[in-house]
Image (spheres, rainbow, N blue to C red):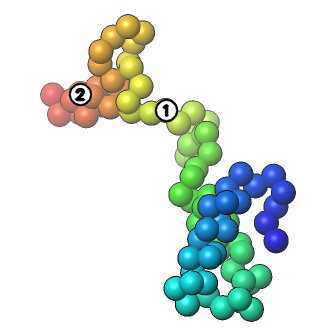
Amino acid sequence: MLPDGFLGKQDVVQSIFLELIEGRLDRKQLSQHIRRFVADYNRQHPGKFAKFGKSRLISLDQPLFDGGSGTIGETVSRSLWD
């Protein structure tokens, strides 16, 4: 029922089993809810690029400069308030 190249297949299956065990989903309703599970996974795990532009997503823990001790997160949070 899930696409072959879908990377989050195991996570979606885990969510399905969890809802089946908790009684929030009936086995007969499964085919109707597959899209919702895939959409939930995609919302929780966005791709490499921001949805509002063409820039790549970066970690705020990434060093600002090579060999430096400051991170991008520190620069963003401090420069906004200084």
Rendering coords of residue 40 (x, y %): 59, 66
Name the residue rendered at 62%, 76% in the picture: 17
Q: CA distance from mark 2 to mark 1?
A: 18 Å
- Circle 2 residue: 79
| Residue plotted at (17% across, 34% down) | 81
Q: Quadrant of the N terminus?
A: bottom right
Instruction: Identify which residue, 47 or 15, lies in the foreground.
Output: 15
Q: Is 22 situated left or right of 20 in this image?
A: left
Can you give x and y, in whole percent of width and height, for residue 7 in the image? 71, 51
Which quadrant would residue 20 be assigned to in this image?
bottom right
Q: Which residue is mark 1?
A: 58
Task: Specify the amino acid type for callout 2.
Answer: Ser
Q: Is residue 39 visible?
A: no
Quadrant in the rendering for residue 36: bottom right
Label 2 secondary element: helix
Q: Is residue 66 left or right of residue 56?
A: left
Answer yes or no: is residue 70 visible: yes
Q: Mark 1 falls on what kind of element?
A: loop
Q: Which mark is residue 77?
A: none
Dot 1 amino acid type: Ile
Residue at the extreme top: 67
Other-residue count near label 2 (Cα within 10 Å), few / some / many at <14 / 14–19 / ≥20: few
The location of residue 9, given as percent across then percent down, is 71, 60
Asked if the residue at tag 1 contacts the one at tag 2, i.e. Cβ–Cβ closer than 8 Å, the answer is no
Q: Nearer the viewer, mark 2 or mark 1?
A: 1
Vertical placement of residue 70 versus 33, above or below? above
Question: What residue is rendered at 61% in x and 39% in y?
Answer: 48
Q: Is residue 74 above or below residue 31?
A: above
Classify the position of the C terminus by image quarter. top left
Q: Which mark is first along the chain, 1 or 2?
A: 1
Q: How many marks?
A: 2
